[in-house]
Structure formats: C-alpha cells, structure tokens
Image (spheres, helix red, strand yellow):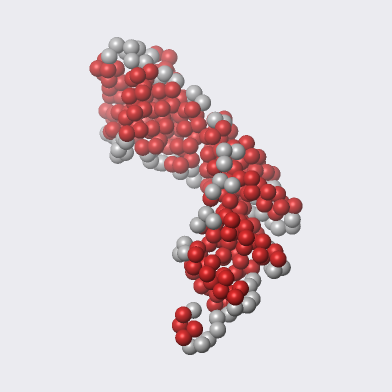
Amino acid sequence: LFVMSCYKVMPNTITFNSAISACEKGGAWENSMQLFWAMVEQSVEMDSITYNASISACEKAGRWEKALQIMSDMVQSQVQLNINTFSAAISAFEKVAEWTKAMQLFSVIAASEVELGAITYNAVISACEKGGEWEKALLIFRLMAQNLVQSDAITFNAAISACEKGREWATALHILDMMVRSEVRIGEISYNAVISVCGSSGKWQKALQLVGSMVQWKVEPSTITYNASIRACARSGELEKAMQLFIISGLSRVEPDTTTCDAAVSAFEQDGNKHGNISSLLATVAQKLQSALQSVPGSRRAIHELSSFSLGWSRSA
C-alpha cells in the first residue's frame, strides 16, 4: 500500500482485502483495524471478505467488542452476512468465555437460513465449556449430532472438557467411544481429560484402564496422564496403585514434575499406616512390578499389567 501511494495509485477493495487478510493471518489486528477505517475514510467499497477478515482479526486478538461492532456496521451497510461472519464472531466470544453472547448469536443463526458447520458448533460448545456451562455445551453437542453435522477432534475434545467440569464420567467415556466409531484419532488430550473426570468421580479402575488403552493404541502417556492417574488412585485410597504409577512414570521417558510428586506424597499422607512404613510399601510395589518388567524392558508392559489386573490386585490388597 505504501508503494502504491508513492506512485499515486489508489488501492481498491481487492488491495485492501489482501492487506487486511495478511494482517489477520499475522496476528496484527491493530493494523487490520487501521486498514479497515482507512477504507471507510477513503470511501472504498467493502464486501463480505473485508468484514469477515476484520472480524477474524479481532477474534484472534480476543477483541470481541470490536468484532461485534464490525458485524453491526456490516448489517447497517447491508452487506450479506454468511457462515464465515457468524463463525468468526462466535469464535471471538469463545476466546473470552462469553458464552451468553455466543449462545445468543447461535440462536440467531439457527433461526436463519444459514447452514451451520462444525466450526460454528465447535466455537459455541467451547464457549459454554470455558464459561462453566457444561450442560449447555453438551446440549449443543447433542444438537450437532441430531442435525447430522460431522464432529471432529475439536468437537469431541470440547465436549469431553465439558464432561470434566460436570464430572460426567459416563458421558465422557461414551464420547470417547463415539470418537472410535467415527474413526477420529484419539490423542493424549482426549485421554487425559477422560482419565481426569474418571478420577474426580472415584472411578480409578476406569482411569487405569484408559492408561492401558493409551499404550495399546500407541498414544504416549505424558506427565499430565500420570498426574491424573495417580490422583485418581489417591482419591480412592488406592495407595499401592498410586505408587505403582509413580514408579512407572520414573521408568518411562516422561519426567515426573512437582505435581506428580505432590500427588504421590498426598497418597502417603492419606493412608500412611496401611502398609506400616514407606520401605515395606515400596517393597510390595516393586515385587508386583517385577514380573511385568522382566519380559519386556521399560514401562509399557508395566502399564499394561497395572491396567489389566487392577481389579484383581484391588481385591488382594
């Protein structure tokens, strides 16, 4: 634009749109706004691309007020709003957990003839989840399925996060099963969220089974995985299982952090007298892990044994 001005060539709609889009992709929302208002001052015609790129720039910067203002200007200028407009605006609300505004705009879109896609649904689900409205998030998730809109990994993860906030462990497991049936790859984030909700709901056996499932499907457990699993066992008084996981985390390529250690210490504090002392407890844990580690070096076999035989060990403990 600067070079054009040097040659006294006036930029047009296409030129401005390209510049605004470049700023939007580069995260320079203020530059996008300067270009937007320059178009207004120079009476350059604006189209849906102009408005959508400007709204998207505001969305990425978390400036939902600016995004709403631009959408209002778009309506006043009688420029046709489309699915990209609505999706960008809802995403702006989602970034700052403004779930009420996201829901209001979603209702407007649903009442119109605009066909909703996964991006719009995902933004609304995520906005409700971040705003602590987990029931509304799951309601939109179910509505999405009813309207035959294809869910993706973002959809499922947002819905599972909503379950985590509402401690809806059974629903979280169901959504995980839906991911398998939909042939959507289940990653570490999905597993960790479900392990966490199972742990907070007292379902430590389910949590350990999920850790074993991660190993089976070659999803590498992370520090977050171990932290959630250790806490799950500690909350349910399964001291021995918690320490088994703590040792496994040390044997794996994952470095335990302060949260891991705190969870292990918490397990000792909750039931310190059950095994007499720390030395005897560690001896018991080591003995039960020994057979799992003999045939295959490393932690993967141990995790498998721990998840597969957790119920049997629980009865014998």
Point out the image quarter for the C terminus.
top left
Q: Residue furthest front?
A: 41
237 or 282, which is in the foreground?
Answer: 237
Q: State how many labels appear.
A: 0
Is residue 125 visible from the viewing direction of this image?
no
x and y, in percent, of residue 309 in the image: 41, 23
Does residue 158 appear left or right of residue 204 in this picture? Answer: right
Percent from the top left, x then y, of residue 303? 36, 30
As drawn, which residue projects farthest toward the left? 279
Q: Quadrant of residue 48?
A: bottom right
Residue closest to the eye, 104 or 239:
104
Answer yes or no: is residue 187 visible. yes
What is the residue that sits farthest to the bottom in this orientation?
7
Across and down, in percent, residue 70 comes to 62, 63
Q: Is residue 76 above or below residue 194?
A: below
Image vertical order of residue 239 relative to residue 85, above or below? above
Q: Position of residue 47 (x, y in %)?
A: 64, 71
- Quarter occupied by residue 295: top left
- Above or below, 173 against 279 in this view is below
Tell me the residue at 46%/86% (across/down): 6
Q: Would residue 88 appear left or right of 276 to someone viewing this image?
A: right
Who is closer to the viewer here, 76 or 264? 76
For the point 55% across and 81% down, the residue is 11
Q: Quadrant of residue 292?
A: top left
Q: At x 70% / y 64%, what residue is drawn?
A: 75
For image coordinates 56% across by 32% down, the residue present is 166
